[in-house]
Image: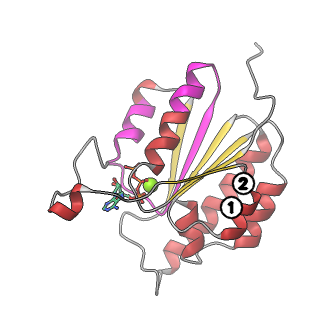
Amino acid sequence: MSRPRLSKGLVQVYTGNGKGKTTAALGLALRAIGHGYKVFMLQFMKGSKDYGELQAAEKYLPNLIIVQSGLETFVSKESPSQADIELARRGLETAKKVINEQHYDLIILDEINVALDFHLIDLDDVLQMIKTKPPHIELILTGRYVPQAIVEHADLVSDVSLVKHPYYQGCAARKGIEY
Ligand code: ATP
Ligand code: MG
């Protein structure tokens, strides 16, 4: 059965220090799914199954596939473990494969900007992936510290600025809000 495909897929970036980047991408996924599109999200540097979006996708959203390629622990920018590097690289290989298979309409590379900033993956590799993506696929890159070269190759860049966050009032991460 035929299904809709995007006539023009663009490259979007959600970056900045404020809260709302990953959840903006998930909101976009929800909107796209409502119109019959299929969404694949690959989460770099994340390995915890305790994210509500993983459970929601699995239970209620067959057209949203979320795959993680990271450890449950925080990555050290100065000395990432070999496993952190290996998982990020594998994640990028998976992303390239999924993009080229063209089975999904929106492909979200969650926290890929951070993986680049931490030098877990190669910037030229990611730029090449962006430049050669099939035209009807929308690519969404999230995470703080987006490299300027990615900004130059993106069609849409939203910089979420930190004005207030309850974390700075001592409020710990809340289930269903932060994860
Ligand atoms: P969200 O997943 O809620 O959309 P995000 O993707 O914008 O947040 P990240 O930079 O990926 O945020 O940070 C990961 C976690 O830290 C999330 O749980 C997020 O809610 C929280 N967070 C976001 N911004 C801040 C901040 N400025 N200070 C403290 N914690 C934050
Ligand atoms: Mg995020």
Residue type at the position of mark 1: Val
Residue 173 picture location, percent across and down: 23, 54
**Residue 168 or residue 116, whichever sits in front:** 168
**Residue 31 or residue 71, whichever sits in front:** 31
Residue type at the position of mark 2: Ala
Numbered badge on residue 65: none
Kindly indicate the quadrant of the structure image that contains residue 101.
top right
Residue 170 picture location, percent across and down: 14, 62
Report the Cα–Cα distance between label 1 and label 2: 5 Å
Q: Is residue 173 magenta?
A: no
Residue lying at 44% horizontally and 43% vertically, measured from the top left: 23
> Do callouts 1 and 2 mark residues in contact (Cβ within 8 Å)?
yes
Query: Going by the picture, which residue comes out furthest to the front?
Result: 163
Numbered badge on residue 154: 2
Q: Is residue 137 left or right of residue 71?
A: right
Q: Which residues are magenta?
A: 29-58
Residue 46 picture location, percent across and down: 44, 59
Helix, strand or loop under label 1: helix
Task: Using a 10 Å C-alpha cutoff, classify the residue at mark 2 as few (fewer than 14 neighbours), some (14 to 19) or many (20 or more).
Answer: some
Q: Is residue 150 left or right of residue 47?
A: right
Query: Going by the picture, which residue comes out furthest to the left?
Result: 170
Q: Is residue 28 above or below residue 146?
A: above
Q: Which residue is mark 1?
A: 151
Q: Is residue 87 among what the camera can see?
A: no
